[in-house]
Structure formats: structure tokens, C-alpha cells
Image: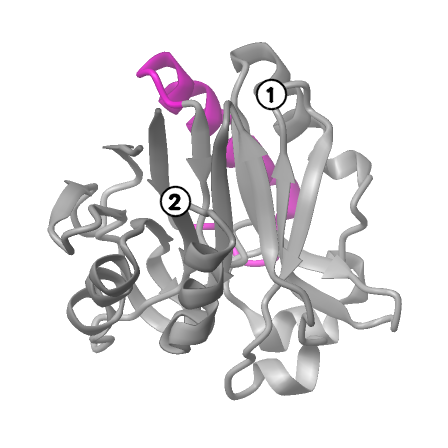
Amino acid sequence: MIVAAAQFAPVAGDVEANVLTVAGLIRGAAAEGARVVVLPELALTGYEPALIGATPALHLAEDDPRLDPVREACRAAGVAAVVNGPVRTAGGLPGITSLVFGPDGELLTRYDKAHLHGIENEVFAPGTADGRFTLDGVRFALATCYDNRFPDIAERAAADGCTVYLASSALDAENDSFEKVYPVRARDFGLFVVLANLVGTCEAGPCVGLSGGWGPDGERVADAGPERAGFALAEVG
């Protein structure tokens, strides 16, 4: 199976524009053989916690009609997509949520970021459940940015039969996760790790892309490079 790690610079607060970009990346990655496409943290709005907190109109529902182009791209291309944005929870606040749409465009699962960081604690509700889905017999785990600093998430994923660990992130130029987190999770728990990271400037600072994947030995298997919008293809399993 091929998983695409996509990256781009979202337009701050413009859900409609970002949805169209996401749909285009899904279609483009599928044309190159991807079966699953992973998008960065808060790809639907940009990583803009203060803006999201001040603008309830940016909070999405699972069945939000603004996401129809994403669902249609999944159906048309026959792929699954992990799309992250501020999605309402039962308590009213949004989560930093990965919605996983299947090849039929229907929702396979959602995962709400469990470990919030900094200002996120003022704007979002933390998740309480692990994220899982299975496609074509391959079991996937989900995690979001700061989650990846906590090895128990990857440990539970491996124990639960997952072979691929998908991370949506917003990592700036000073972040050491590319060397000290993602390859370590892959190596320590025998997982394929696929990271989708933002590019461009946002409230997290200047994000540096470098989306891609690591094999179970901790070695890089795909790299989208810095700054350029697009995707890297990682063969997993």
C-alpha cells in the first residue's frame, strides 16, 4: 500500500479555499498510486488557534457541507483521506480533529488530539480515545503533533495490531521531532510512521514541510522536502 503525506500552506481562516486545496492534493496523490492521503494539523483552517477560538464560524461538524469537495475527491479517486481541522465535540468546544473519509466518501472514524499544547488548551477540547481504522486489511493508528511526544500512543498502536502510524502536525523550523520523535517511534515499536506537516507561516511560526515516512527500522522512506506544496509517497506494509 502507498500512503501519501501531503503538505501545503493553508489560507488562514479560509475553510473553503483550503478544502479545495486538500481535494486537489487527494486527487493528485491518488493519481500517483496512493491509497491513503494524510493532511497536516488544522489543514482546513491553518494552524491558527487564536483565530479559531475567536471565530466560531470556523468550527466544523462531521457532516459539514463545506467538506463535500473532500468527500467527492475520495469517492472519485477511490482513496481514504485523513483531514484535520477544528471539529465540534459534544461539549461544545472543537477538538483538533482528524476526520478519516473512506474511498466511498463516508466517515470511517475521527480522532481528537489527546495532548494539547500551550494556547490549544484555551481553545480546544482534548480527546480521550485512540484513533484507529482498517483499510484493505491494514490497521492504522492516528496521532496529532504534540501527541507524538508521548510514546505510549505508539506503544498501544503496536499492541493493537496497527502497522502504520499516521501523524498530522504543525512543526516549525526549530522542532527536533524529525530526528528525535518520528524515527524513534518507528524503530521502537516496529511501525511505519507517516508524517504530514504544514509549510508556510502560521501561529506556530514558519513550518518547514519535510513530510514523508519512516520504516520500522527508523530510516526515512519518503521526504516531500521543505517549503514546497505537494506530497511524498511512502510504501508501507
Q: Residue furthest left?
A: 219
Residue 18 visible? The answer is no
Quadrant placement of the N terminus: top left
- Label 1 crowd (10 A; few <14 / some 14-19 / many >=20): many
Along the viewing direction, whichever of 204 and 157 lies nearer the viewer: 157
Q: Residue at x 68, y 36 (%)?
A: 108
Give the vertical position of 57 relative to 14 (above or below).
Answer: below
The amino acid on which the numbered mark 2 sits, given as a three-letter code, is Val
- Image position of 48 (left or right of 123): left
- Residue 213, given in percent of the width and then of the height, sits at 24, 46
Give the vertical position of 184 relative to 123 (above or below).
Answer: above
The amino acid on which the numbered mark 1 sits, given as a three-letter code, is Pro
Residue 31 visible? The answer is yes
Q: Please tell me whether mark 1 sits on a helix, a strand or a loop.
A: loop
- Label 2 crowd (10 A; few <14 / some 14-19 / many >=20): many
- Which residues make up the magenta segment? 10-34
Q: Earlier in the sequence, mark 1 or mark 2?
A: 1
